[in-house]
Image (cartoon, coloured by chain):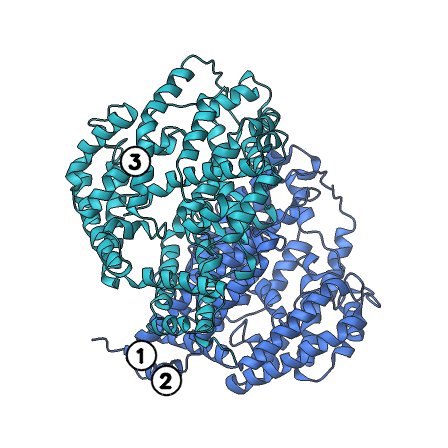
Chain colours: A cyan, B blue
Amino acid sequence: MSTTPAYDRLHATWNRLHHFGHLQSIAGWDQAANMPPKGMEARAAALSEMAALVHGIRTDPALKDLLARAEQEALDEMQRANLREMRREWRSANALPESLVTRREMATSRCEHAWRKQRPANDWAGFLPNLKAVLEIAREQAQRLADLGGGSRYEALMHEYEPGLTTAQVDRVFGEVRQWLPELTRKVLERQSTRRLIEPKGPFPVAAQRALCEQAMRLLGFDFEAGRLDVSSHPFCGGVPEDVRMTTRFREDDFLGSLMGTVHETGHGRYEQNLPREWLGQPIAQARSMALHESQSLSFEMQLGSHPGFVHRLAPLVQAAFGSQPAFDPQNLHRLMTRVKPGYIRVDADEVTYPAHIILRYEIERPLIEGEIEAEDVPALWDEKMQELLGIDTRGNFKDGPMQDVHWPESLFGYFPCYSLGAMYAAQWFAAMRREMPDLDARIGAGDLAAVFDWLRRNIWSQASRWTTDELAVRASGEPLNPAHFKAHLEARYLGD
Amino acid sequence: MSTTPAYDRLHATWNRLHHFGHLQSIAGWDQAANMPPKGMEARAAALSEMAALVHGIRTDPALKDLLARAEQEALDEMQRANLREMRREWRSANALPESLVTRREMATSRCEHAWRKQRPANDWAGFLPNLKAVLEIAREQAQRLADLGGGSRYEALMHEYEPGLTTAQVDRVFGEVRQWLPELTRKVLERQSTRRLIEPKGPFPVAAQRALCEQAMRLLGFDFEAGRLDVSSHPFCGGVPEDVRMTTRFREDDFLGSLMGTVHETGHGRYEQNLPREWLGQPIAQARSMALHESQSLSFEMQLGSHPGFVHRLAPLVQAAFGSQPAFDPQNLHRLMTRVKPGYIRVDADEVTYPAHIILRYEIERPLIEGEIEAEDVPALWDEKMQELLGIDTRGNFKDGPMQDVHWPESLFGYFPCYSLGAMYAAQWFAAMRREMPDLDARIGAGDLAAVFDWLRRNIWSQASRWTTDELAVRASGEPLNPAHFKAHLEARYLGD
């Protein structure tokens, strides 16, 4: 007879959820990568049936009692951490009444659907009422989550993506970055303005691009026995840990976009592929959070992929793929990868100006959710902050301004900070690696990436959700998130010798 | 308030099963077409979880009462037909106790696993005890199905694939064919022995083969907005009616195999794509049976695909794909497609000798299931019947004899007859078409296939499971299955002018 009967039942329930999640994930990937258009309605109906089933399991009233009884059982440390994550998931799934979930789905799908036409038409006036409807429901959702989990409304939303993250922490980190980023950007631009840059000449055949991307994935240790690369209009990393489905997209006139996008997704992919197998199916075996996931993709894309040593390894592959060109000289290739240019669009931003976009989103969506400002106030704030942070004029340009992302139409408030926190964690991981291995950059230049992967496996991948994010950061690097490492990284790469 | 509350609940239950079936089907297709090897364990666990869920819904004790109450409700004709199909599915799902299902799964998976090595080693002695174990359980399963549904043991197994089919009917049909087939085969061989045949010269690049297959699918009306063609090691037609996933496989030294295999699967695919949408999700909207499904694939592959008129349409596409060759002359191509050669292997058999393989399987597996013979008796019977039906000596060659198919290791007893019944129905459909449209062959020669598709859509596809197979055959062609049309087809094609 088990001495932990309540915990055992919870364990079995989460295993079941894991199996159903597998089918949801593969069907979702298939929808993006394979599904012909007329399959949409049937797929949506099937996935909605599955979502209802999973929701029913997560909101089964018996879970509340089981969670309480399991707390009293003699659990070991791992089981206790797993129970903590179960409770967190359970609270999130049970916080919202079904009527609110339905209203949110209706409002976001209406807003997003209209946005797809309103954005190209620069139609802020048409977009505004839909956004207001989404926002109203998001505030209600945030309030309910906050009532249960504590903290402010906006914190409650952030916790859906980054458990435990406080606005105090984000304020501190973004406040620091805000102080040095505009000046650093100015210096980098000045410096880059005089250097010579050779543009690559296309077209770059898709088959050669695909082969190049797969070679880069192999260099970066992606296990093709446990995953694939396919094409979708919005690249993502899906599937399941045992079978990671990465996607990219190809443009014949540009290969760097898909190459570096693939390097980025490979970071997500290796995190998933190396999550601990002995806990598979349980919450503790899942990736810790969105910021940590992004710290892996940006470790691959920015820390490693744009590392001058790694670019030396990549350059011969690029030449083999598309023939020799002056632009494919390693130094020039590295310059292309690290070109800084303030712009309107977040997803096109370089490593240096990217945080400005995120800080702006945070400084707008946080007061929006807290009810300190209204949706009508967004454009003026946007213009003001874009001028201040990036020195660009966005007045009247809504489509490349507050209408540029799908996040707000989809009510993903609280997600944006994870992107930049991920970049900062990535810099922090590499700073810790350099302390442990002073010859790290030489090793990368010699093509020896094993040390990097071992460090990430030991400190991040294998740890999954065993610790809180802060605990994990301290264990891995000796301190919680510290943006000084990100600053040092940018200075070394963009203002160093 | 609905006047048919019990029926309505059944309707909702089957819709739910349909949605879960969608995810099973797509995950199954993905497993065959995409999944990397290390994904296997997780996929099997996820699909097994889903199978348990679906089994639980199908065996919910409440269904028995609902089915009985629905019989008393005021249903229209379509609802009544749907209820008939629900009851049939329900009976089949509830006939076997869980312990028997588990034992069958263990026995078949052990037998099949060992067979994969025993077959190449020609190891009948090793295979025999596993086959006996599978057979013992199949007899028990057959007895239980027969107890519930009536008929003999073997009939009960056939009904899992072809509802309502009786051994009396199969005896009559195969008995007739048996009388004329050996002599007809002899005549065809004699006639073909003198004709000149030019072999195509490879290699045939895979990319060109794939493009050619897709062109053939387009000619045959496959809707690529509602389906795809991919590669798997065992070609099949999967997915769902709204999103049909066909697969094929390519060999560089032979293009006709994948081309005609694709034409075959396109018949299955169009049947699925054209099932009635207004009943989607209900049993009545499903393909009628395995023999009718095969009647569609063979209508495409044999009646249409190997029609001399159609080959004239195909020949220029073949030439465009691989360059000009004497072998690609339409007449020669047609001769290649209709070459008759008695052989050991059923799946490689031509249209004329194929039924001999099926009759042999039927004459062995039927007494096996009824307990009239034992597994030990199979090789001697096999040798005797192969000699009698095809004039070939199979003594001692178990691997190309009774060990050649996966069907017996997988306990698919009762399935084999559907293949040849499908070929006979296909001939019967085209005979009916010719009565309605005396210029049918001229139309096909002129590339006008719309009349064929319209006839199939009206008489087969749109009718789905509304009628029993016999009723459908009578409505479509004026009579139940009549093998005389198949004989006439073979005589016209192989012994005509």
Which element is circle 2 on? helix
Q: Residue B307 in the image: x percent, y percent?
A: 59, 50
Distance between mark 1 and mark 2 Cα atoms? 9 Å
Examine the image and state in which quarter residue B493 appears.
bottom right
Q: Nearer the viewer, residue A290 or B322?
A: A290
Whole-number angstrom distance, CA of label 1 to CA of label 3? 64 Å
| Residue in the picture at 39% in, 55% down | A43
Residue B230 placement, left or right of A465: right
First in residue order: circle 1 vs circle 2: 1
Does label 3 lie on the same chain as label 2?
no
- Seen in the picture, residue A24 relative to A475 is either above or below; the reply is below
Q: Picture coordinates of residue A227 (x, y %)?
A: 55, 48
Residue highlighted by disc 2? B65
Q: Which residue is mark 3?
A: A175
Quadrant (top left, top right, bottom left, bottom right) of the N terminus of chain B: bottom left
Q: Nearer the observer, disc 1 or disc 3?
A: 3
Identity of the residue drawn at 41% across and 72% down: A70
Tell which of B148 and A178 is nearer to you: A178
Mark 2 crowdedness (10 Å alpha carbons): few <14, some 14-19, many ≥20: few
Q: Could you confirm whether marks 1 and 2 are on the same chain?
A: yes
Q: Secondary structure at mark 3?
A: helix
Question: Dot 1 corresponds to which residue?
Answer: B6
Spatial CA span between label 2 and label 3? 67 Å
Q: Secondary structure at mark 1?
A: helix
Pointer 2 with pointer 3, Cβ within 8 A: no
